[in-house]
Amino acid sequence: MFKHILLATDGSHLSQKAVHSAIAMALAFKADLLAVKVIPHYIQTYFEGSLAINDVDVKQIEAEWAASAEKVLKQVAEQAKAKGLSITTEVVKSDDIAQGLIDTAENHASDLIVMASHGRKGIKRLLLGSETTSVLTHAKLPVLVLR
């Protein structure tokens, strides 16, 4: 049924449900599994919402974000390998997390996206947005959302 599963993870406790489910599904369907963590570019100007800092500091901050993402993905890969599953990981840089996931799924010919939802409501949802809702709205492939 599914042959190429993209697992979106942010390293949170909640995203572990998505990790476990994606690994189980990949094993059951004998599918390829791609684990993805999307990180943004550093906002560099005051008008974009941040204090301007020099390029060296920006590169250092972005390198720290990338290293943190790699650590999250390494933990996912270890869980998959412990179950006997081959897995690929990728850190994606995108200022639009949802679009980064969708583009990566399309680039890798994924036929399913597995992700968790934080289930924010009210003002938190308004202020923080919902990446899950955006993926559900714009993806042209099935999305499994876990809560």
Image: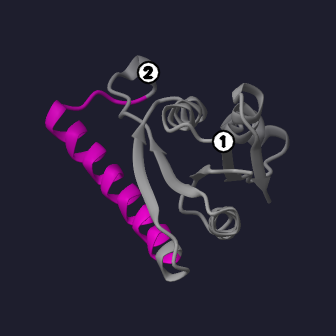
What residue span does the magenta drawing correspond to? 50-79
Q: Earlier in the sequence, mark 1 or mark 2?
A: 2
Asked which secondary structure carries label 1, the reply is loop
| Labels 1 & 2 near each other (Cβ < 8 A) | no
| Left or right of residue 116, residue 8 in this image | left
Quarter of the image for residue 77 reads: bottom left
Q: Which mark is residue 111?
A: 1
Q: Residue 61: where, in percent of width, then height?
A: 28, 46
Q: Nearer the viewer, mark 1 or mark 2?
A: 1
Q: Which mark is residue 68?
A: none
Q: Which residue is mark 2?
A: 48
Residue extending furthest toward the right: 122
| Left or right of residue 101, residue 144 in this image | right
Q: How is the image coloured?
A: one colour
Quarter of the image for residue 57 reads: top left
Residue extending furthest toward the top: 47
